[in-house]
Amino acid sequence: MIKKSRALSAMAGVLCVVALAATAATAFAAPSKTKAKGKADSGTVYAATTHSAGGFEYIAGQGTDKMFGSIASTYKAKVGAGSTVGTVKLTIKPVILFTSTGTLSGTSNATLTVVSTSSATVKGTLDLTKGTGALKGHSFVGTVTGTGDPATGVYVFHYKGTYK
């Protein structure tokens, strides 16, 4: 279960990072008096579990965002019970995405499916609502998918969504 938790946590972290990167891109848009429609963004994050403490998995990652270039991320994941064998539900709060101009933070909910002792998939959502620096007032809503190795806690996440 710990290996599944680490894998799930890593995947959730990556998803959060992706969402934060997307939100950062929106912050650079010129202010408008009309409601913003948002911009499409996508990226990839490479993440790994750094440690476990107090029932949480702590994850860190680095990646590339289509709009913002190099990004970093951190995640704090709580692993919940699965509804079927090999499936674990993850709640990640906070997810923090770091860009060169600010941060985006929020939550992610995902499902980690352990296929074998060395293979897992992740699928979930990202909801980043708090920005700092140039990203203040911006948000990101999107989805995350990924693959990884539950034994090592190393994952690759791909995200896409809308930044406002």
Image: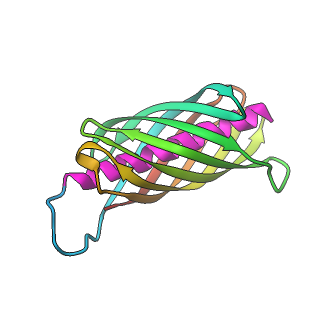
* Residue found 59% across the figure and 46% down from its top: 92
Q: Which residue is at the front of the view, 111 or 56?
A: 56
Specify whether residue 4 is painted magenta: yes
**On the rendered structure, is 29 left or right of 4?**
left
**Residue 19 percent across, percent down from the top left:** 43, 50
Q: Is residue 146 above or below residue 152?
A: below
Q: Give the side of residue 10 with respect to residue 15, left or right.
A: right
Residue 120, picture quadrant: top right
Query: At which x and y percent is residue 1?
Result: 81, 36
The C terminus: image quadrant: bottom left
Residue at position x 29%, y 40% from top?
102
Magenta span of residues: 1-28
Answer whether residue 149 is visible to the viewer in this image: no
Residue 148 sits above or below residue 26 on the image? above
Q: Residue at x 39, y 57 (%)?
A: 140
Q: Is residue 19 magenta?
A: yes
Q: Tell me the chief SS of the magenta region.
A: helix
Q: Nearer the viewer, residue 164 or 65?
A: 164
Q: Nearer the viewer, residue 3 or 156?
A: 3
- The answer to whether residue 45 is seen in the rendering is yes
Colour theme: rainbow
